[in-house]
Structures are given as C-alpha cells and as structure tokens.
C-alpha cells in the first residue's frame, strides 16, 4: 500500500504542468453555453492542442493511435488538467470515451483507420444514440428498427438524451436488427453519419433551462452496412465491452472540481458570516471527509486497474452511488451558504445545484446501480 | 502509485483471519458472551491474550531489534480490521500502543488499558492502566464484552489509536454486510429469498458502498498518518460500522432483535468504538478548518 508516485509519474506530472502553464493563457475565450457551433469549435481546438502536444488518447492503446499510458498517468493527467482549469472534454466525450474505444476494440482495420484518427486530432464529433423514450434503464428493450436494403441498413425510430446531437458528425447508434431474437441478441452497433437524410434533431430543455441534449428522430435513414462495428445482432456485447471496461478514472476531474468548490464554499461562508454557524461548518467538514475518501477510493481503483488491466464495472457502480449522492449534498450545502441568493440563477452554484439533480439518474440511476452492486458483487438473487 | 495490498499484506490478512477463526470463532465468542451475567463483568482470557502476543498482534510495529515484527501502520490496520470482524474483545489498541513502552505488553504477558476521552475499557482486568483513573466509576456497559468505566478527567487522544479503531470499525462493517447478505440469500418469504426484493437488496448494496468508501479512507490514513486523513477515516468508518450493524439487524428482522443473534454484538461494539478518540464534532470542525487553509484548496 503506497500513495507515492514513481519518479516517472512525477516527471510526467511536471512536464504536463509546464505545458499547461504555457498553453492555457493562449486559449480563445470560452463560448457562451448555448452557442453550440462555438462550443464545438472550442472543444475540438483544445483536442487539437492536446494532439499536437502528445496528450491525445492517453488511455487508448498504442495500436489505435493512443499513448497507452498507465492508469496512474491518466489519473495524473485528469487531476492536473482540472486543477489548472483546462477545458473539459466536452464535445469530444463520446468519441474519446466510448465510440472510439469501442471501434478500437471491435472495429476492422478499415474502420479504425477511418474513424479513430479524426477523434484524436479533434476533427470529428460523435454523439450517442442509445436510450429511447421507452428504453431507459431497460436499454436492451430498444425498438429503433434497422432492416437490410442492399448495402444499406434503413433505420427508423427515435433516440433521446443525445448530447451534442446538433453539432455531431457521427452517432454511435444501437438498433434492433432481429425483432424475434431475445432482446439482448437482436441489437447491432452502427456508425451513423449525422448529415444523412431523414434525421431530425429536437433539442430538449433541461430543468436548468439549458439545452444540453436532444431527441433524435430517424425516418428511414440509410446507413451503409460497412458502418456496422461487430457482427450483426452482436451489438449488445460490442457496447458492453467498452462500458464495462473501467480504469477507475471516470470521475477524477469531477472529484477534483468538487473539492475546489467545497473550498470556495468555505471561503464564501466566512465572507458572508455563515461560517459562524457550527452546524454549517460541521456539514462542510463532513463533505470534506466524503470527498477525501472518494479521492482515496479513486486512487485505490486506479491502482487496482494497474494490476489487473481494469477494474470491473461493478467497482464503478460502488463509486458512482456515493459520488452522485455526495455531489448533490455539496450543492445543497452551497444553497445554505448562499442563503437567499440560492434562488438567484445568476449565481453559478444555483445552476450547478439544478444540474446536480441529474447525477443520480444519468449513466444508470442509483436504483439500477444498487441492483448491479447487490446482484453482481454481493451475489443476491435476481428478481424484483 | 500502488495503493493496493501487497502479496505479504494479503498473506498477513489471511493468516490473522485463520488464527482468529481458530482461536476466537463463533463458539468462543458466544461462550464469552454467555459467561458473564448482570452482576459479573466479562473476564479477559489470559491464555488467548498471550497467544495474540505470540502471534505478534501487539509487537507488530516494534522494530525487529527490539523483539518486534518490524511492520508498519498499514499492516497493523489489516490486523485490527480482522480483530473487528471477529469481535475480538479486550484492550487491544491500548496494549498494542504500550508495546515497547510497558514491559510484557508486546508479548501479551501484561494487559494494558488506557483512558480514552473520559472512558476506560477493561479497567479491572488490566495489569497497567495509562492515564489518570482517579474517581473512576463503573458503567453497566451496553456492550456485553467491553466493561467500561468513566473518569472525571479526559485524556488526550492518540492518532494511531484512532487509525486502529477505524480499522476495527471497518472490519465490523464488512462483517455485518456479509451477515446481512448471507441471511438475505437464505431466508425465504413470499416463496423467494428476501434478497430478491429490491427493498432488501438496496439496503445491502448501500452497506457495501459505505464499507468500500471507508476502506479507502482508513487505508489512506494508515499510509499517510495525516491528522486530517485520520479524522476523515474515523468519521466514515464509524458511519459504516454503526449504520452497517443497524441495517444488518433490519435485514435479519425479528431474529436480529434477539440476544442469540450476533448482530447486536457488532452494533454495541461499534457504539463503544465510536466513543473513542476525537468526537465527530471535533473531526468535522478540523476538516472544516482545513477547507480554509491554502493546503486544503
């Protein structure tokens, strides 16, 4: 058990810090949150800078164009970029963290050559077409149909919660290619070009007032069969290969950001006098314990994946359950610090509090995560 | 960074678990509980204490030159985690801390108790007591296997004792999670194991989450020995142990409320351990002040 970094890891950190200090001042101003083309250009520009400096696809295998660094170095990268206030992965999220790794693991040489380099170079944006209005937690119940017509699939149906749909070049799409097979065995994974005829994108407004994602309606959209990754009807397994691969780094930047916000809350409370309330101080102190522990658990999981080549996705469920809950508690505490200003939408924490309501829902609700932990780790029987 | 158990640490954990299963298994535990009555506080098994001494439980962190095992706080944490799992009774932490300072403590010949806050565990059974016990008054201890006295003057708390206590809490929390899961898998109602019901399943899942979060904090505190890491570890380990035992009791239903179940022994001991060291309020205050320091940013 050791928390110290090796000399190589420290050198990696030092070089990264130096690079960040050099390049961050040269970044263009951040676009406004509802300027989607501007956000796309900004996020891709940042990805290009990472690429030119040798920091693109750090966690991707070398034969996919990545750097194949260790999980600990990836942890250091995410920690240092967040601490330095570097841009978020943003529009590059699906390409770098899901569609890309899926293609790297399951794609043909031609597919890898076509789709992976543009993701790393910051040239193409991917979005995700998984969830449907009637297939949320029960994702495998998805009904978007695809049938063969010559060298194409013809796809009809609708997808929901698709981030960056308005500005994406590609969509990693799950479709039903065999309606008679058991639900997990009739699904295929397609790369759909977002400029194909028949695609309608309708932005969805969140309770925070912003349009962070969209509904995507598909009306006889033609997708070449050559764009299918993996075998026909094997799309569920193809998807899970990537979803269940975890290096323990999924929430590194967010935990670092939460610890920074917690410090800001304390200083704000001291400024406005609420620090004199011992109940508030104890509440913030408790949150400090929580986020310190989540940081340690992150280090534990990253070290585990260093030893074993990955942590089981179930380990990620344990982490996400606590993290998503505590992050909501953080913003409830922020409201107490703000007092009446907690109702002022011009305060960043007020909007963040609203956004935090999604954490226990997105990427697997807490209820589904508890089922996963109970059934796959603890071995409790299935059944409701 | 290698924040995982080494081969040697895994072997140590397995060895201690097997030793305790052999020397202080469930039958011995229940015999110890049943041996004491309302007027008769539990006695300490001196033979077992010497065996623990021979196994190195007390001399673990003493240098080999001084007759110790020469290991560090992380290894001691793994050993005390096992002690917590097994509900091993006695002033383990106080005697461990006295090794090398009080003759016979390291070998288990001398039983050492210590004032912690305003409480002393095992005062009457101890050969040596550290701290001022003038005016000590016996309590009717809620934990059948931990006799308690109150003293008028509080003693300062020891950070290493806090880490080892957190380790015991962690072991107890992991154990109550296992007990709840075992029961939920085998106990049937409405024609199926109660663990198939989400209401029960989710209680068990949250127990595991608390254990794993506490584990990260406790092991990190063992590595860094940093006062704030220790404060955080104490808070999370106390929560995991107390709420874990409580939820375990709930999963066991009516049987969980009986004397013959082991669940109440975990809950009561967790309550005793939670009283050791820094109070939750003081730990939270220290962690709050840290947020204002430049290092906490």
Image: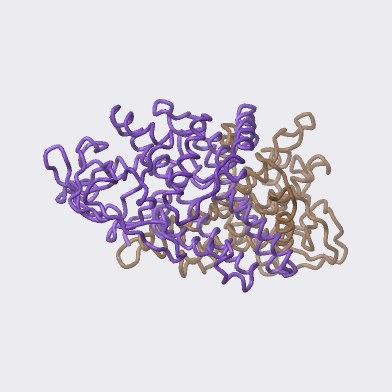
Chain colours: A purple, B brown
Can you say which quadrant of the picture contains the N terminus of chain A? Answer: top right
The residue at the point 23 percent across, 43 percent down is: A188
Tell whether A323 sits left or right of A97: right
Residue A194 is situated, as x and y percent measured from the top left of the image, at 29, 46
Residue B265 visible from this viewpoint: no
Question: Toward the viewer: A360 or B157?
Answer: A360
Number of labelled discs?
A: 0
Query: In the rendered image, which quarter is residue B197 located in?
Result: bottom left
Can you say which quadrant of the picture contains the C terminus of chain A? Answer: bottom left
Residue A303 is situated, as x and y percent measured from the top left of the image, at 54, 37
Farthest residue toward the left? A150
The residue at the point 74 percent across, 69 percent down is: A273
The residue at the point 36 percent across, 43 percent down is: A126
Tell whether B37 sits left or right of A307: right
Residue A50 visible from this viewpoint: yes
Question: Toward the viewer: B26 or B170?
Answer: B170
Q: Note whether A42 is above or below A49 in the view shown.
A: below
Question: Toward the viewer: B197 or A41?
Answer: A41
Residue A120 is situated, as x and y percent measured from the top left of the image, at 43, 34
Residue B87 is situated, as x and y percent measured from the top left of the image, at 61, 54
Query: In the rendered image, which quarter is residue B152 located in?
Result: bottom right
The residue at the point 22 percent across, 35 percent down is: A226
Q: Note whether B119 is above or below B158 in the view shown.
A: below
Tell whether A213 sits left or right of A177: right
Question: Toward the viewer: A13 or B94?
Answer: A13
């Amino acid at each position: 058990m050791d928390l110290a970094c090796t000399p190589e890891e420290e050198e990696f950190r030092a070089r990264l810090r130096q690079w960040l200090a050099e390049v961050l001042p040269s970044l263009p101003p951040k676009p406004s949150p509802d300027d989607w083309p501007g956000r796309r250009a900004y996020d891709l520009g940042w990805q290009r800078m990472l690429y030119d400096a040798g920091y693109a696809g750090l966690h991707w295998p070398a034969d996919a164009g990545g750097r194949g660094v260790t999980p600990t170095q990836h942890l250091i990268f995410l920690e240092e970029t967040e601490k330095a206030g570097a841009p978020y992965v943003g529009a590059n999220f699906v390409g770098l963290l899901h569609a890309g790794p899926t293609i790297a693991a399951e794609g043909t040489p031609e597919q890898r050559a076509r789709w992976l380099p543009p993701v790393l170079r910051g040239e193409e944006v991917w979005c995700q077409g998984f969830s449907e209005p009637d297939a949320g937690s029960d994702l495998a119940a998805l009904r978007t149909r695809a049938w063969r017509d010559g060298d194409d699939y013809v796809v009809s149906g609708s997808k929901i919660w698709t981030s960056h749909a308005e500005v994406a070049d590609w969509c990693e799409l799950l479709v039903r290619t065999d309606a008679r097979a058991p639900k997990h065995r009739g699904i295929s994974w397609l790369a759909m070009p977002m400029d194909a005829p028949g695609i309608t994108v309708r932005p969805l407004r969140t309770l925070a007032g912003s349009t962070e994602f969209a509904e995507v309606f598909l009306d006889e959209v033609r997708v070449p069969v050559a764009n299918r990754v993996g075998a026909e009807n094997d799309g569920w397994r193809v998807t899970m290969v990537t979803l269940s691969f975890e290096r323990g780094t999924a929430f590194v930047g967010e935990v670092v950001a939460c610890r920074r916000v917690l410090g800001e809350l304390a200083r704000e409370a001291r400024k406005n006098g609420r620090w004199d309330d011992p109940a508030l101080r104890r509440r913030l102190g408790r949150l400090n314990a929580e986020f310190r522990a989540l940081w340690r658990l992150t280090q534990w999981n990253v070290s585990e994946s260093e030893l074993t080549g990955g942590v089981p996705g179930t380990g990620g469920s344990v982490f996400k359950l606590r993290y998503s809950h505590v992050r909501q508690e953080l913003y409830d505490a922020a409201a107490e610090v703000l007092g009446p200003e907690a109702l002022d939408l011009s305060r960043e924490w007020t909007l963040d509090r609203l956004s935090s309501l999604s954490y226990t829902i997105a990427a697997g609700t807490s209820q589904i995560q508890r089922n996963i932990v109970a059934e796959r780790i603890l071995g409790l029987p299935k059944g409701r | 960074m290698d924040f995982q158990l080494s081969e040697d640490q895994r072997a140590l954990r397995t060895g201690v678990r097997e030793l305790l299963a052999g020397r202080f298994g469930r039958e011995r535990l229940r015999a110890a509980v049943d041996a004491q009555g309302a007027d008769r506080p539990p006695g300490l098994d001196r033979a077992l204490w010497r065996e623990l001494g021979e196994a190195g439980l007390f001399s673990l962190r003493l240098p080999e030159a001084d007759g110790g095992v020469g290991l560090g706080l992380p290894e001691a944490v793994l050993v005390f985690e096992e002690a917590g799992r097994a509900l091993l009774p006695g002033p383990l932490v106080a005697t461990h801390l006295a090794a090398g300072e009080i003759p016979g403590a390291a070998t288990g010949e001398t039983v050492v108790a210590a004032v912690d806050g305003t409480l002393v565990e095992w005062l009457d059974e101890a050969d040596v007591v550290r701290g001022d016990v003038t005016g000590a008054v016996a309590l009717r201890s809620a934990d059948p296997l931990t006799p308690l006295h109150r003293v008028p003057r509080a003693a300062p708390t020891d950070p290493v004792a806090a880490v080892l206590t957190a380790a015991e809490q962690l072991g107890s929390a992991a154990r109550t999670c296992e007990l709840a899961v075992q029961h939920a898998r085998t106990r049937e109602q409405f024609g199926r194991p109660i663990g198939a019901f989400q209401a029960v399943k989710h209680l068990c899942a949250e127990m595991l989450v608390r254990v794993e979060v506490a584990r990260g904090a406790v092991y990190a505190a063992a590595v860094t020995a940093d006062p704030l890491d220790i404060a955080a570890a104490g808070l999370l380990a106390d929560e995991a142990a107390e709420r874990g035992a409580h939820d375990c009791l709930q999963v066991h239903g009516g049987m969980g409320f009986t004397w013959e179940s082991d669940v109440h022994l975990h809950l009561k001991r967790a309550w005793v351990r939670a009283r050791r060291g820094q109070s939750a309020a003081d730990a939270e205050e220290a962690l709050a002040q840290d947020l204002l320091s430049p290092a906490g940013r």
